[in-house]
């Protein structure tokens, strides 16, 4: 898990205060109250990641729960070689991708089917002068979106993404450029819904 | 601004957090099982972790002299500097009395600091949440101390979390140019 440590730590750790150490250490010893405090601090970051990867509120909620249930057991593996938030992000990414793999529809999408037209179609009325980039990302085709989120937002290298998604590095790069191209087109106000 | 630059700018502005629409904790709590660790082993690991924390905190502890508010009567000191006894009392405190004294002293310092800083803008939006988390960590440690009031590792951990609270409040209210 920790080999995939290229996540954008600056985004994750705006204030580098070691506030979570006592909580992590207590949670590692089975203190549920401490773990709940950790959950309250980090769950919105994890949920944001899950939502961007799954593009679905319900799946993101389920994936977030899955992350924190599995994390409880994985806490003993955390060895303080990296920041807890960095490690958590890496674990959350792996668990979410695994969760998505378990969903039959996701496997189908990843193998050969792009996102359905109704999902891909962009509601131009939402694109006011204040562009909602999140909404645009969510409307990207699934393969392109997952790669884009991992590379452009989470800071993973294409090699790591390829290993995580079991695809070729070149495929990861191609999907990233595809996603980026679509977003730029949409920002130009052209070709909505294509 | 062209679309490529705009996309880069929007990416940097993308929020790192998003709130789920429902409470997820209840479902998570139901799924939690006891960690795979025996009690005795856990006890040893706890003490080892506490020692590691103290060592690491001792290595990174910055000088605390400069950020004590004028309204606070006693300066904030590092764990190594701070004695386990209240000012003006020649008899060192022990056990629960010491924990109580440390907590009261810290609460007074924190309140004084918050009063001093309340008119200054904060550099981050979620510092109060972080402070709440630190207070919860303090609660966890205090609870552990009730079971083992003379555990020096826990006492130093309590002092550490106290100092992190003060450091957080000071840091988020300090203008960037003063931090250079």
Image (spheres, helix red, strand yellow):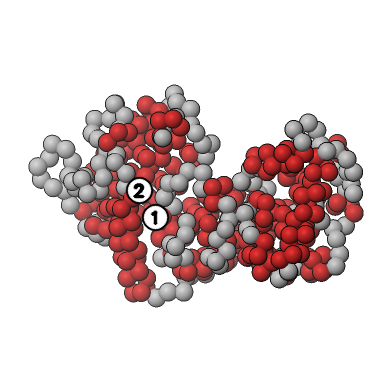
Q: Secondary structure at mark 2?
A: helix
Is residue A112 visible in the rendered image? The answer is yes
Is residue B147 left or right of A54 when viewed as pictured? left
Query: What's the chain of the residue with tag 2?
Result: B
- Residue sitting farthest toward the left: B90
Query: What's the chain of the residue with tag 1?
Result: A
| Residue for badge 2 | B161
Q: Residue at x 46, y 74 (%)?
A: B36
Is residue A53 left or right of B160 when viewed as pictured? right
Task: Determine which quarter of the picture holds residue B179.
Answer: top left
The quadrant the C terminus of chain B occupies is: top left
In three-dimensional space, the C-alpha distance between marks 2 and 1, rounded to whole angstroms, equals 8 Å
Residue A157: x and y, percent?
Answer: 64, 60
Residue B106: x and y, percent?
Answer: 30, 40
Q: Residue at x 77, y 49 (%)?
A: A180
Residue B163: x and y, percent?
Answer: 33, 43
Q: Secondary structure at mark 1?
A: helix
| Residue for badge 1 | A22
Q: Residue at x 28, y 30 (%)?
A: B72
- Residue sitting farthest toward the top: B119
Circle 2 Cα neighbour tier, 10 Å, few/some/many (<14 / 14–19 / ≥20): many
Circle 1 Cα neighbour tier, 10 Å, few/some/many (<14 / 14–19 / ≥20): many
Foreground residue among B14 and A45: B14
Marks 2 & 1, CB-CB < 8 Å contact: yes
Residue A23: x and y, percent?
Answer: 43, 55
Foreground residue among A186 and B74: A186
Q: Examine the rendered structure and indicate whether residue B88 appears above or below residue A81.
A: above
């Amino acid at each position: 898990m920790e080999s995939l440590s290229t996540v954008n730590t600056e985004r994750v750790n705006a204030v580098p205060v070691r506030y979570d150490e006592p909580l992590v250490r207590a949670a590692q010893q089975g203190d549920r109250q401490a773990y709940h405090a950790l959950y309250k601090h980090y769950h919105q970051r994890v949920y944001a990641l899950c939502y961007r990867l799954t593009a679905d509120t319900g799946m993101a909620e389920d994936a977030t729960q899955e992350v924190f249930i599995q994390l409880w057991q994985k806490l003993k593996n955390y060895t303080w070689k990296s920041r807890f938030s960095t490690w958590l992000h890496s674990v959350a990414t792996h668990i979410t991708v695994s969760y998505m793999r378990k969903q039959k529809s996701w496997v189908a999408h990843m193998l050969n089917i792009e996102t359905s037209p109704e999902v891909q179609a962009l509601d131009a009325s939402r694109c006011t002068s204040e562009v909602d980039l999140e909404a645009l990302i969510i409307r990207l085709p699934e393969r392109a979106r997952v790669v884009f989120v991992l590379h452009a937002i989470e800071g993973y290298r294409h090699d790591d993404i390829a290993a995580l998604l079991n695809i070729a590095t070149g495929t990861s790069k191609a999907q990233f450029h595809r996603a980026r191209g679509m977003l730029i087109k949409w920002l130009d106000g052209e070709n909505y819904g294509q | 601004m062209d679309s490529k630059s705009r996309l880069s700018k929007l990416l940097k502005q993308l929020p790192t957090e998003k709130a789920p629409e429902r409470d997820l904790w209840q479902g998570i709590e139901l799924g939690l099982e006891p960690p795979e660790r025996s009690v005795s082993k856990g006890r040893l690991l706890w003490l080892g972790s506490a020692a590691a924390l103290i060592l690491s905190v001792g290595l990174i502890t910055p000088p605390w002299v400069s950020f004590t508010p004028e309204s606070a009567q006693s300066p904030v000191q590092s764990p190594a500097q701070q004695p386990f006894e209240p000012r003006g009392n020649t008899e060192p405190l022990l056990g629960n009395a010491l924990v109580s004294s440390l907590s009261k002293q810290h609460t007074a310092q924190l309140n004084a600091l918050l009063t001093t800083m309340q008119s200054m803008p904060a550099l981050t939006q979620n510092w109060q949440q972080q402070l709440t988390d630190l207070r919860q960590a303090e609660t966890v440690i205090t609870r552990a101390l009730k079971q083992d009031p003379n555990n020096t590792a826990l006492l130093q951990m309590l002092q550490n979390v106290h100092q992190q609270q003060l450091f957080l409040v000071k840091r988020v209210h300090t203008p960037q140019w003063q931090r250079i």
